[in-house]
Image (spheres, rainbow, N blue to C red):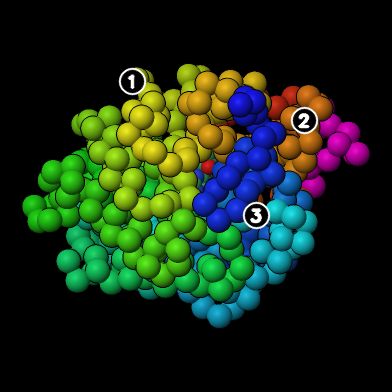
Amino acid sequence: MTESTLFSPLRLPTFETSNRIFMAPMTRGRAHADGTPSDMMVDYYASRADAGLLITEGVCISPRARGWVGAPSIYTADHVRGWQAVTDAVHARGGRIFAQLWFLGRVSHPIFLDGELPWAPSAITPKQHVHSPTGETLDCVEPHAMTVEEIAATIAEYGVAARLAIDAGFDGVEIHAANGYLPDQFLRDRTNQRQDGYGGSVGNRIRFLREIVEECSKAIDGNRVAVRVSPRNLYNDIDDSDPETLFGTFADDMNRFGLAFIEVVEGLPGHYLFVDGAPVLPVMRSAYRGLIVANGGYTSDIAEQAIADGAADAVAFGTPFISNPDLVKRFEIDAPLNAADPSTFYSAGPHGYLDYPDLSQGTAEAEFKPLSLGEARKH
Ligand SMILES: Cc1cc2nc3c(=O)[nH]c(=O)nc-3n(C[C@H](O)[C@H](O)[C@H](O)COP(=O)(O)O)c2cc1C
């Protein structure tokens, strides 16, 4: 058998990707205020369509899921129509695209929720802040600990959002269970201190996410559902006393669903998401029989090696895709990469969004470097 490379196709359960260079989900804050995708977003995703798979920025599944200025949503007919324009443009260029389903939970703020408290597994205030629509920085508040009925209602909303995503033309969905947002808040013992069937043991803490996966698998085929986790990530004031056991058990548990893939975010040494401790990716790799996508500071060389070694089946690139719409081509011919400008990551308008040069326009002066700690507001 010939060895797989970054440029080998990858057989997902429902289609084959043209390469193993995936675009990582990245919030860019360019949607309309009501969460409808803008025309700029159509161009942004379409111009990156030669990625093996595009994963969208976090997309809020319901009004209560919100908490980020300019983030898109998927719960109204307008949202679906807006996303249809994105998926049509990506498909017209031969690309494939998954929607990342997002619920912020305790790191939202009443300002986004019509004055109501954010929901969370437990009433523990995050040491975190939000940026309001009018530009103020506001401290997070003590969230409301969800009742079992509210948990059930939220799980049902994930299923509805997954269905709407398929109606909008997406090839699948990725459940955002990483980076300290709601499903991650249930997974990790710093944020989940419940005494009922959704807290305590590892099995109980996995339950919320498993039931979301189950619900989405019923709503659309399980093989169009992916999950993203970040086992050691501390962003959003989150942590766990034993990530190896938690995420190893989670990975094993996922074998029962024919998922599209599991994406594992773990910063490589030197990367802004790096956290001390042995990587959890190999533990998950040996526990899980399906496809694994790795992310967190990969260069094309390191990614190539990870695929050759069998450490992952594909690699998702985040910041390199922000500043290089033609990243796949640049990797292919080993061209230099444009540097990414963090000051425009979440700004409004086309600057820093649609105006990075492609190869025909040359390469920007500065050279691409992985972000250092504090350079980006991490997810
Ligand atoms: C501007 C920006 C926005 C991000 N938004 C999201 C997001 O919406 N969902 C998510 O899961 N991760 C998000 N992330 C994290 C990235 O997906 C990725 O994990 C991170 O950038 C590390 O990969 P990289 O080194 O290739 O950039 C974001 C990162 C950046 C820089």
- Which region is colored magenta? 355-365
Residue, disc 3 = 96
Q: Inspect the magenta stretch and tell me whether residue 363 lies in it.
A: yes
Q: Residue at x 52, y 52 (%)?
A: 13
Locate the N terminus and report the quarter of the image it occupies.
top right
Residue, disc 2 = 332
- Snapshot quadrant of residue 278: top left
Q: Amino acid at mark 2?
A: Glu
Count up the numbered dots. 3
Residue, disc 1 = 277
| Viewer-closest of 201 and 252 | 252
Q: Residue at x 36, y 29 (%)?
A: 286
Choose the circle earlier in sequence order: 2 or 1: 1
Residue 289 horizontal/vertical position (percent): 39, 38
Residue closest to the far front: 1
Q: Main secondary structure of the magenta part?
A: loop
Left or right for 287, reference 368: left
